[in-house]
Amino acid sequence: MSMPNIIRIILLVAPWLSVPVIPIKSFKQFLPVTLFASTLVTGLCALAVPYKWWVVEGGLKNK
């Protein structure tokens, strides 16, 4: 596994380490919004690849 993949895994797991210290009331209050936002971002990222929304054309000078 390459270093960038390890960093991505750490960035995925690290926020979940704070869940035990969050009050249950706050966790339940913000969970629906969190799930909605993460689903929205995941969907946009999944659609961006086939529709080429984030393709930068040109060489290094144009980027």
Image (cartoon, grey):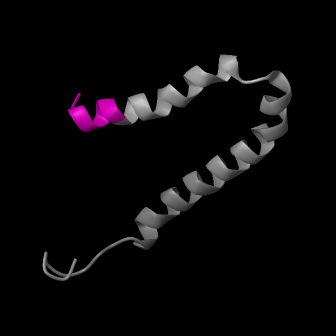
Magenta residue check for 23: no
Magenta stretch bounds: 1-7
**Front residue of this view, candidates 57 and 24:** 24
Residue 46 position, x and y percent, is: 50, 57
Q: Residue at x 55, y 30 (%)?
A: 15
The answer to which of 23 and 46 lies nearer the viewer is 23
Which residue is rendered at x = 78% and y = 40% of the image?
30
Residue beneath the point at 76% across and 47% down? 33
**Is 24 on the left-hand or right-hand side of 46?**
right
Q: Is residue 40 above or below residue 11?
A: below
Residue 18, relative to residue 39: is it above or below? above
Prevalent SS, magenta region: helix
Q: Is residue 54 left or right of residue 61?
A: right
The spot of residue 8 in percent (x, y) is: 37, 36
Q: Is residue 60 above or below residue 20?
A: below
Q: Is residue 10 above or below residue 32?
A: above
The quadrant holding residue 62 is bottom left
